[in-house]
Amino acid sequence: MSLVLSEEQQLLQTTAREFVSSRSPMKRIRELRDEGGDGFSKPLWTEMGQLGWAGIVVPEQYGGAGLGYVELMVVMEELGRGLVPEPMLSALLGASALVLGGSDAQRTRHLPQVAAGGALLALAYQETGSRYDLACVETRAERAGDGVALHGEKIQVLDGAAADHLLVSARTSGEKRDAAGVTLVLVPRDAAGVTVERQHRVDARGAAIVRFAGTRVGPEAVVGGVGTGAALLQRVIDRGTIALTAEMLGGMVAAFQMTLDYLKTRQQFGKVIGSFQALKHRAARLFMELELARSIVMAAHEAVDAGKGDQEVGRLASMAKARLSDAFVLVANEAVQMHGGIGMTDEHDVGFFLKRARAAEIQFGDAAFHRARVATLDGY
């Protein structure tokens, strides 16, 4: 596994870092939080689409950049450093579902718009009590004419209120928690019978509760095979999880660097506090966590680019998420602690990283869930 970026990847990294530092200061993050809207700036998202970021892994024939997951990792890390809330993750989830399981007609219609940052597909798959079980689906898709009618409710739909279409997991057969019988359906957000309740998470990013009351879609709306959506959904979530770990890594790096700068300047008892042995030890531990995190994040992204099988990609996705869930929270907690009293105030930036760490920790499964999954995949 290569631990060094290529020249082209380093150039992409520099471009992304300069964009984030110039276009997304922490002041903007506060303003978006206080506005209480979508949680991100649509004009800035359009700019990111023009840079090609929304379609990094979308094939060129569908308007994307046709790059790999390592390039995606480079951009996601820089966005994580700046806590940039624009819907890169939602765009990836929607695009991945169409790339992996969509028809050519679906790809041709939707992917160019997604890649350009002009349209957004939100993945609606979680339900009350599902607890990371992708097959725990009670939302029903009942036959209606030559199509289906949806009935049910989805929770924690990331960027659901800002989406143009919703990619919904619905049960076409079987019982709750049956792996078979789950179907993915593409639904316009403004379709009849769709109700969207806007929410905001602890990190101020947008989510939604989405309800369906007899919402009708035709057979062309099915993504992948009827009744086989759970397997496709797992592949999509694994790729989203891998991308999320890169963003989490960026947040860890930024919080750690912010803490180092504080340790080098804050004085107590006539000395900079970074000279105290206890704080040196704590900082050294965080540095080791960062290095371990970077290794597994790079391994997971490279596995997708190398065309590894679904089991190996899923295994590395879970290994990365288990480590990053623990490590990001540790780094963020320590950052607040070592900043002392000012770390607890809303005026200081470090608290934003703690909130992001707490939200990202449980997204797509917490550390305990992913450790158990790795054990299962390894045959234990």
Image: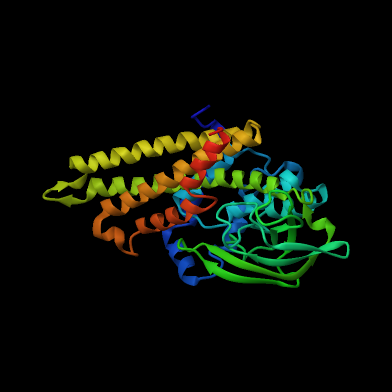
Q: Nearer the viewer, residue 115 or 242?
A: 242
- The colour scheme used to paint the residues is rainbow
| Residue 269 appears in the picture as rendered | yes
How far across and how far down the image is residue 102, in percent? 76, 48
Residue 309, percent from left and from top: 65, 33
| Residue at x 72% of width, y 42% of height | 59
**Residue in view at x 84 percent, y 57 percent:** 219
View extreme (left): residue: 269
Q: Residue placed farthest to the front in the image? A: 175
Q: Does 373 sit above or below residue 379?
A: below
Q: In front: 66, or 96? A: 96
Residue 300 in percent (x, y) is at 55, 36
Task: Name which residue lies at 33% across and 49% down.
Answer: 258
Tell me if residue 12 can be seen. no
- Point out the residue furthest to the right here: 146
Residue at 61% x, 44% y is 239
| Residue 127, placed above or below residue 112 | below
Looking at the rendered structure, the number of numbered marks drawn on it comes to 0
Comparing 34 with 46, the one in front is: 34
Q: Is residue 82 left or right of residue 231?
A: left
- Give x and y (percent) for residue 201: 49, 63
The answer to whether residue 159 is left or right of residue 276 is right
Quarter of the image for residue 168 reads bottom right
